[in-house]
């Protein structure tokens, strides 16, 4: 009989041990209450601010530019602040007596009735000197609670995502939420006094004076184009359009490289960095690979034909020059994304990430017809999708406060005209592109079309054609068809197609006087 008793004792011991383990893994309900982690908040700061407002209504104006009722943690405090805000901005006085009539009679805060609670807030209020600090504390804690909600949404979406929703979409949505949270609700806002506005205007003028070319925008590296545009300005959507083989990608690459090459950072008093000259460039190359783009840039900088570089038909000295130039320019702040077929939302998410991590001064898209919109827009028609893309690019330019240079194809109707120079109506799906763009430019090379008209050698027409080719060889026109803040016109450029380089045209009236 000893064995059963031993077995029974063993069972009792195991049961006791199991209960101990369960209690350690699952604390009692009282322990749950003690260990429950509440969202970050500061009720005392909320009470102090509300008390200061009730005692001196001027305290509201120290926080009302950035603080809203939703930033308060306690629902009763939200209501008190909302009512105070409405009463004071209506020109009336907010006191415990005047605002209690806006609450129901049965509202209570703990053991106190609402009138008693309002009276205590006013009685224990400090001066309004610290009102701004209290408001910032409340706001910062509200941001932390918002971060928690974003994290919870991210976790819930990851657990319960739809079958057809790719994980990258969830990442982009989370990045957008975080970026919006980081960029919105900055302290301040509202009206600026004229002296502050004048200070900002002088700062803009000073930056223009300090930059090469004395431009308020980013210098493209092309003198006459900078003169027409004043540089590339933040928040502008610049469209560069043309028919195939006109050199759109080459011109965009030249501009991007010139800006990145001239980048000179300056540390501001707050420790952040801004571009004193040039800028950090993001280049979304949806058609051309990163190595092809790098080959073009090296070809342009060395003067060695990109065709010869690709074929390997270069001398040892030329190869040494390629290596030397590559070592010099490899560290310029030019970032290339060669992913094809991305959506405008994906592009925006990657641009936000780059600006947050490295900085961003110019964004180039080659080219916008290769972007995609949402699946809903795509299922409607292409015009609606292009409208979504151009609207998204313009909104992104304003959000990031950087210029966006987007390349665009032209419709084939250009080829059917005698004069092949592009017009605004030639833009494919032109309505939204023309409407959303701040600047629309067209690349045109008469030489390209003249080469196709080559007549039979030895004829009179051939001699006329040969004379025409001598006049237009290496010439390009950059037609500014629309500029929201400046003139339109034509900029004459030099184009060396062997190295895909656009440059300023050397005019006779700009050359120095010849020696006699």
Image (cartoon, rainbow, N blue to C red):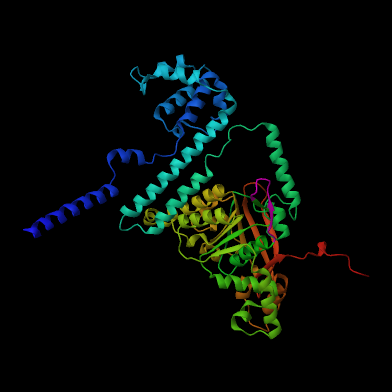
> Which residues fall within the magenta stretch?
262-272
Q: Write the residue at 35% across / 54% down.
A: 158
Percent coordinates x, y for residue 489 in the rendering: 68, 54
In the rendered image, the quadrant that contains the C terminus is bottom right
Which quarter of the picture shows residue 250?
Answer: bottom right
Q: Nearer the viewer, residue 472 or 174?
A: 174
Q: State left or right for residue 315 relative to residue 184.
A: right
> Of helix, strand and loop, which mostly describes the magenta segment?
loop
Q: Write the residue at 52% across / 39% down.
A: 185
Q: Is residue 270 on the magenta stretch? A: yes
Q: Nearer the viewer, residue 404 or 183?
A: 183
Q: State left or right for residue 338 relative to residue 380.
A: right
Which quarter of the picture shows residue 190?
Answer: top right
Query: Which residue is the extreme one toward the front?
Result: 2
Query: Which residue is the extreme one toward the left?
Result: 1
Query: Which residue is the extreme one toward the top?
Result: 97
Vertical position of residue 134 compared to residue 376: above or below: above
Vertical position of residue 44 compared to residue 33: above or below: above
Residue 90, visible in the rendered structure: no
Q: Is residue 152 on the magenta stretch? A: no
Which quarter of the picture shows residue 126?
Answer: top right
Percent coordinates x, y for residue 414 in the rendering: 55, 63
Percent coordinates x, y for residue 461 in the rendering: 67, 77
Percent coordinates x, y for residue 383 in the rendering: 44, 55
């Amino acid at each position: 009989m000893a064995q059963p008793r031993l077995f029974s004792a063993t069972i009792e011991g195991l049961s006791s041990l199991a209960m101990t383990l369960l209690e350690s893994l699952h604390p009692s309900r009282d322990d749950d209450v003690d260990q429950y982690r509440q969202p970050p908040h500061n009720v005392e700061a909320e009470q102090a601010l509300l008390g200061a407002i009730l005692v001196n209504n001027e305290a509201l104006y120290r926080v009302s530019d950035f603080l809203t009722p939703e930033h308060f943690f306690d629902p009763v405090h939200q209501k008190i602040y909302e009512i105070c805000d409405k009463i004071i901005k209506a020109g009336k006085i907010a006191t415990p007596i005047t605002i209690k009539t806006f609450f129901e009679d049965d509202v209570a805060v703990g053991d106190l009735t609402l009138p008693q609670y309002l009276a205590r807030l006013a009685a224990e209020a400090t001066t309004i000197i610290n009102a701004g600090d209290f408001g910032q504390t409340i706001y910062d804690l509200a941001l932390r609670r918002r971060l928690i909600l974003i994290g919870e949404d991210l976790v819930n979406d990851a657990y319960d995502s739809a079958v057809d929703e790719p994980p990258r979409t969830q990442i982009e949505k989370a990045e957008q939420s975080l970026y919006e949270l980081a960029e919105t609700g900055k302290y301040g806002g509202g009206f600026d006094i004229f002296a502050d506005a004048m200070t900002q205007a002088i700062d803009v003028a000073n930056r223009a004076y300090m930059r090469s070319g004395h431009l308020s925008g980013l210098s493209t590296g092309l003198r006459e184009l900078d003169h027409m545009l004043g540089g590339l300005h933040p928040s502008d959507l610049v469209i560069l359009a043309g028919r195939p083989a006109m050199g759109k990608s080459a011109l965009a690459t030249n501009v991007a490289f010139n800006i990145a090459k001239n980048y000179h950072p300056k540390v501001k008093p707050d420790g952040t960095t801004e571009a004193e000259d040039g800028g950090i460039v993001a280049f979304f190359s949806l058609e051309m690979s990163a190595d092809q783009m790098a080959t073009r840039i090296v070809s342009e900088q060395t003067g060695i034909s990109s065709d010869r570089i690709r074929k390997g038909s270069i001398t040892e000295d030329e190869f040494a020059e390629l290596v030397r130039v590559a070592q010099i320019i490899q560290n310029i702040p030019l970032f290339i994304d060669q992913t094809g077929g991305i959506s405008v939302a994906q592009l925006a998410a990657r641009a936000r990430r780059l600006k947050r991590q490295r900085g961003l001064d110019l964004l180039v898209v080659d080219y916008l017809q290769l972007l995609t919109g949402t699946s809903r827009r795509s299922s409607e028609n292409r015009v609606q999708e292009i409208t979504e893309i151009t609207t998204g690019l313009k909104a992104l330019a304003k959000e990031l406060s950087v210029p966006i240079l987007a390349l665009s194809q032209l419709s084939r109707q250009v080829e059917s005209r005698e004069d092949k120079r592009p017009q605004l109506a030639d833009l494919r799906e032109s309505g939204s592109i023309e409407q959303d763009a701040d600047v629309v430019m067209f690349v045109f090379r008469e030489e390209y079309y003249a080469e196709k008209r080559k007549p039979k050698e030895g004829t009179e027409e051939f001699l006329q054609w040969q004379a025409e080719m001598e006049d237009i060889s290496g010439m390009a026109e950059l037609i500014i068809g629309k500029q929201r803040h400046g003139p339109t016109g034509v900029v004459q450029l030099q184009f060396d197609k062997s190295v895909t380089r656009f440059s300023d045209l050397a005019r006779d009236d700009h050359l120095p006087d010849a020696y006699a």
